[in-house]
Image (tube, helix red, strand yellow):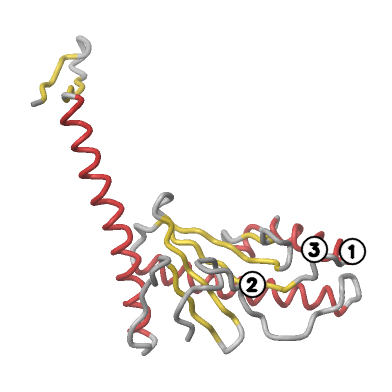
């Protein structure tokens, strides 16, 4: 099925595998890895849920779920199979897509992106219809529970910090007035706002 060939006189070897067997091997390993990454994410979610007394937390049919901290901070999580990643997405501030007075807010948000230590791997972005500022952070789906918990904690802390910075900018009069209403995620089916469980 395979054989080892001597590549050069310095005893370096390569493995030669028939192309048919190699394709089978890749599809088998690839499928296992993708499944095990998703299972790893599911296990981390369940471990976290148990550690906070939630009971059960799992991905929905869109490979997503959400948590609400302190009744105000909503963290949506989505497993991306192609990227083998778990992505955290939260709304920082709803926006009026047609408001021209938001340039200073955008400047503030972009300047926050440059503060690597404070942002802890997350970044600010604008959603597709320009109606909401989002905070986004990605991590490897293969990460162990300790890394998952630490990343989630840092993300929530960063979300609190970014929201307070935006609020401070608005109270200084350097950005558009704050819109009233709760911070809710977008509601597109299968999108960040359709995460299933909110606690």
Q: Is residue 143 above or below residue 186?
A: above
Count of numbered circles on the image: 3
Closer-to-camera residue (131/134):
131
Q: Which mark's residue is nearer the viewer, 3 or 1?
A: 1
Mark nearer the N terminus (3 vs 1): 1
The image quarter in which residue 147 lies: bottom left
Disc 3 versus disc 1: distance between alpha carbons?
15 Å
The image quarter in which residue 143 lies: bottom left
Q: Secondary structure at mark 1?
A: helix
* Residue at the spot 57% in from the left edge and 79% down from the top edge: 74
**Disc 3 designates what residue?**
108
Spot occupied by residue 129 in the image (x, y as percentages of width and height): 71, 61
- Residue lying farthest to the front in this orientation: 189
Q: How many residues crowd mark 3 within 10 Å: few (<14), some (14–19), many (20+)?
A: some
* Residue at the spot 32% in from the left edge and 77% down from the top edge: 47
* Residue at the spot 84% in from the left edge and 65% down from the top edge: 98
Mark nearer the N terminus (2 vs 3): 2
Spot occupied by residue 181 in the image (x, y as percentages of width and height): 73, 86
The image quarter in which residue 8 lies: top left
Spot occupied by residue 88 in the image (x, y as percentages of width and height): 52, 66
The N terminus: image quadrant = top left
**Disc 2 designates what residue?**
91
Answer yes or no: do the residues labelled 2 and 3 have beta carbons within 8 Å?
no
**Disc 1 designates what residue?**
100
Q: Which mark's residue is nearer the viewer, 2 or 1?
A: 1
Spot occupied by residue 146 in the image (x, y as percentages of width and height): 37, 69
Q: How many residues crowd mark 2 within 10 Å: few (<14), some (14–19), many (20+)?
A: many
Answer yes or no: do the residues labelled 2 and 1 have beta carbons within 8 Å?
no
Is residue 93 left or right of 26 when viewed as pictured?
A: right
Q: Which mark's residue is nearer the viewer, 2 or 3?
A: 2
* Residue at the spot 54% in from the left edge and 66% down from the top edge: 191
């Amino acid at each position: 099925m395979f054989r080892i060939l001597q590549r050069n006189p310095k005893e370096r070897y390569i493995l030669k595998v028939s192309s048919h067997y190699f394709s089978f091997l890749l599809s088998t390993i690839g499928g296992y890895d993708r499944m095990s990454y998703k299972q790893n994410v599911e296990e981390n979610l369940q471990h976290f849920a148990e550690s906070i007394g939630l009971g059960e937390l799992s991905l929905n049919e869109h490979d997503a779920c959400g948590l609400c901290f302190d009744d105000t901070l909503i963290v949506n999580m989505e497993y991306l199979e192609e990227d083998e990643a778990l992505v955290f997405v939260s709304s920082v501030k709803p926006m009026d897509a047609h408001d021209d007075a938001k340039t200073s807010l955008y400047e503030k948000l972009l300047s926050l992106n440059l503060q690597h230590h404070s942002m802890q791997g997350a970044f600010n972005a604008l959603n597709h219809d320009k109606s909401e500022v989002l905070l986004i952070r990605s991590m490897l789906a293969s990460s162990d529970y300790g890394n998952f918990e630490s990343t989630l904690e840092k993300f929530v802390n960063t979300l609190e910090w970014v929201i307070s910075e935006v609020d401070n900018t608005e109270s200084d009069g350097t950005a558009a007035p704050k819109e009233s209403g709760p911070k809710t995620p977008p509601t597109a089916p299968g999108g960040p706002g359709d995460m299933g469980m909110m606690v």
